[in-house]
Amino acid sequence: MKFGVDYYPEHWPRERWERDAELMVAMGIDVVRMAEFAWARLEPRPDVYEFEWLDDAIAVMQNAGIKVVLGTPTAATPTWIAQNDPDTRPVDSHGVRMSFGGRHHVCHSNKRYRERSAAIVTAMAEHYAGRPNVVAWQIDNELGNSHNPLCYCDSCRAAFHVWLEKRYGTIDALNAAWGTEFWSQTYAGFDQIPTPRVTPNSHNPSVLLAWRRFCSDLIITFMNDQCAIIREHDANVPITHNLMGFFDKVDYTRMADGLDFVSHDQYPVGFWTEGSHLQPAHRLAMPLDFMYGLKDKPFWIMEQQSGPAGWETIGATPRPGQLKLWAAQSVAHGADCVVFFRWRTCLVGTEQYWHGILPHDGEPGRRYDELKKTVAALKPVMERCVGVGAEAEVAMVFSYDDLWAHQIQPHHPEYNYTGVFSRFYRALHSRGVPVAIVGPAADLSRYAAVVIPSPFTIDEAFAARLHGYVEAGGRLVVTTRAGIKNRENAVIPVTPPAFIDRLLGVRVSDYDCLRAGAVAVSRNGEAIGSGEFWADVIDEGTAETRARFAGEYYTGKPAATRNAHGNGAAYYIATIPDDGFAAQIVDDLCRDAETHPVLTPPDGVEVTRRRSESEDIVFLLNHADAARSVPVPAEWDVILGDSAAGVVKLPAFGVAVCRAAR
Ligand code: GAL
């Protein structure tokens, strides 16, 4: 399976289904995902299951030679659940119970919702077990969306208490870990601990971090319970879930453990997107590399944008060529199958303006034609890529603890952990350096260089792993606000960076939140960029200074350092670098670690690869709305796209693919 569509037979008259299947076959579609919001159709009344219509839809697809991914429908609960069990609806941070309507209008800790979910999933798993045409299960839909905002109901509160007791054992241990002496917040029992609803002042950062972890665990447990039911009945069919890139409510590095493969929803330009249809390549590439890194293997795109994306407001219309470009980009970063959302634009409901491949009238048009050609062009390329990734030499570590701790206390009002992460990613990506994005538990030893933006929370075990990595020859970059907090989100009482100060050869004796703006940074007296949001004042230690601040009372103090350690080296960046400074850091790092870009692409062009033992499949993707020429090595075969005399010609939004023997 290489290409699919998200299909909602329940939205269309029965007489239309065969025509849809016929049009799908004509454009090369191999698989459809169905049923993830169809609970009310599948169980119209409690314990009354009606699978005939779905059996029929699956049969229509089977007759056309199209496989099926079945969604469990727990993301959209029927009215009878909300009516019979009003407590299933979530409560906001003001204590107000939310209304039925929309979707995900449920609390994941609610006992009745869990029972009803288990019942429908069991009924579906029993009914569809062993069905030859069903090739995968998708659990729910975009879990975590429901916890935005989080649910603060009494059931969640009780579940939070159980979770806390398991983590801390005794209330004294919790009080000590959280420092509840502060403002007389000492607890006499777990049952006194609040869900962090609105208060006159901020909550304790420790309770807030615990709460984020609890909510993430709650969703993961909800998902894993469904996985267990399906595996009990239909053990041979793989299970997936559609993730949302850097969405922040669930720790995806842990969620992925419960899945057979990861899927992702890729919407380059939605109604929420800043800017026009032109988006920087790195912004779209970064979540794809993260999805690959979650299981260190190829993934599926379960929803790939197929038209203008709107709800109440509407995003820019993808220009001719962009749908192909974005689909090719997903493949280039490790998608083995791309499923387009959605087949036909809906006539009713919230998503009337979320455009599918077919327009409202159901007749093939510009998007159908473009994607039909895309499928034909990319399928042969994908045959060569199955199961193969980029084999990146550089990794970046993304940590949910650090994300959440920074969201709780961003220091600078404009500081954003994922934004900082993306600066380094962009600097590497724009140089044609493949990047693996991994969680903190990943084995780092296979990477020549590792970048960890603001490793704010730290413990000795993680620090020991970083020491080991550098001693063995790795090149490590960490940035400001490294080694500040313990895992309870309390400050470690040493001069930072805690536990890695000797590794980095620096001590941060003072700091400045840059509320008045950026500070210039220079190297050998020449301006190379600036530092933003934050500046550390460093006592020079064993580390060699690579760049200096050129402003404020710390003019001349180190802004970037390199410390040789064992067989490797550790860099400390004492601020958040702007793009110019980040580029310098990345150049130094790549030289030092002797990494090899695939090639250095011109502005607006992205280059990345999928690498097998015998060949590299190199993708050249033009995100600019003007033509570009890319000289490529003479020994590369251009297997998709135009080239002449060793130069690949990319039209606006053009795609080319080359093959290089290894
Ligand atoms: C996704 C979601 C789909 C659909 C789409 C368009 O996030 O998974 O069900 O809602 O967005 O809004």
Image: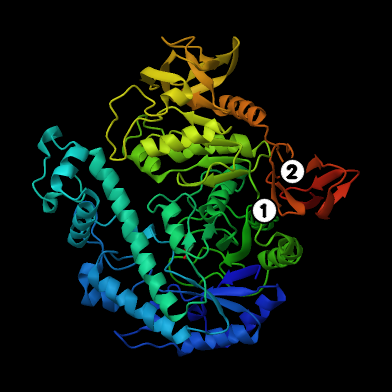
What residue do we see at 31% from left, 55% from top? 215
Write down the quadrant of residue 380 in the picture: bottom right
Q: Identify residue for label 1.
A: 332
Query: Which of the image's four quarters has the N terminus?
Result: bottom right
**Is residue 522 shown to the viewer in this render?**
yes
Residue occupying the far right of the picture: 645
What residue do we see at 49% from left, 9% from top? 556
What residue do we see at 49% from left, 78% from top? 11
**Is residue 268 shown to the viewer in this render?**
no
Write down the quadrant of residue 299 in the picture: bottom right
Q: Identify residue for label 2.
A: 626
Residue 36 point in image, percent of width and height: 45, 72
Q: Which mark is residue 542?
A: none
Disc count in the image? 2
In this picture, residue 245 sits left or right of residue 380: left
In-front residue for pair 567/612: 567
- Point out the tag, 1 or 2, that comes first from the N-terminus: 1
Whether 651 is drawn above or below 104: the answer is above
In-front residue for pair 607/303: 607
Residue occupying the far left of the picture: 188
Write down the quadrant of residue 15 in the picture: bottom right
Whether 229 is drawn above or below 540: the answer is below
